[in-house]
Amino acid sequence: MLDTFSLDSLKSSFKSNKKFRIATYCIGGLFLSVLLYFSYRQFIWKPANEKSKDCYWISLNYMKKGEIDKAIPLLITAVKKYDGYDGGEIAQYLLGKCYMSKGQFVKALNSLKEANPDDTYISVFCIGLQGDCNVELKKYDAALKLYEEASIAGENNLTTPMYLFKAGAVAEQLKKYSVAAEHYIRIRDEFPEYASQNIFTIDKYIARVSSNKAK
């Protein structure tokens, strides 16, 4: 049995059998591709990714001090330099927030659409802030869809009820009272702590949309 797989027989098969040669090249190429990919991830991408996580801190400090005009150019540079890395994606998200604070909602929307952060909460906020931008632009149908998307992205006790509530409010604006009621009722039934934190209890919102629905 071992003779069958001797080095000489493999050499002979390689020379005489075209299919064997092609299969060998394919397997060798696949192995090389995998090796190059993991080498790239380990020795090039990973160090660069770690470095990228420092790219937005100065801008973030400017944002905290309200110095948005100083933060924006630094964030633009960070996004260009570290696009596709964790730090670059967060910089893209922060850039969107900066544009929002200046009332530049179209720019903010475009920036937030481009952001693809790995962090679960930030990725949800990216979607939700796009909803906020659309509300400011009076594009309520788009805002409703985004709030609903944000409410089911990485469901948790913080962002899910918050965006359900925003979805309910926008649905009311669109006179979609049944949709609004569904969102408010879900908050009441699944997120009672959030419901109790509102100035008006969620039951008052449910009663209001139910009344409008009945008209």
Image (spheres, rainbow, N blue to C red):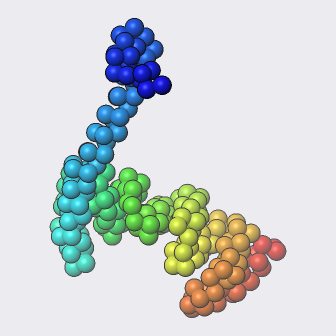
Q: Report if residue 133 is visible in the image.
A: no
Q: Quadrant of residue 125?
A: bottom left
Residue 55 in the image, given as x and y percentages of width and height = 20, 63
In the current view of this chain or complex, which residue is farthest to the top? 16
Q: Report if residue 47 is visible in the image.
A: yes
Task: Please give the name of the residue rendered at 31% of the width and 34% of the height, measured from the top-left corner.
Answer: 32
Pick the front one: 72 or 90? 90
Task: Please give the name of the residue rendered at 37% of the width and 12% of the height, measured from the top-left corner.
Answer: 12
Residue 203 in the image, given as x and y percentages of width and height = 70, 86
Q: Quadrant of residue 122?
A: bottom left
Pick the front one: 213 or 53? 53
Pick the front one: 95 or 58? 58
Left or right of 19? Residue 165 is right
Residue 120 in the image, given as x and y percentages of width and height = 44, 66
66 shown above or below 19: below
In the current view of this chain or complex, which residue is farthest to the right? 214
Left or right of 198? Residue 48 is left
Task: Please give the name of the residue rendered at 21% of the width and 50% of the height, measured from the top-left corner.
Answer: 43
Label total for image: 0
Left or right of 161? Residue 81 is left
201 shown above or below 57: below
Task: Report the quarter where the C terminus lies.
Answer: bottom right
Residue 198 in the image, given as x and y percentages of width and height = 57, 88
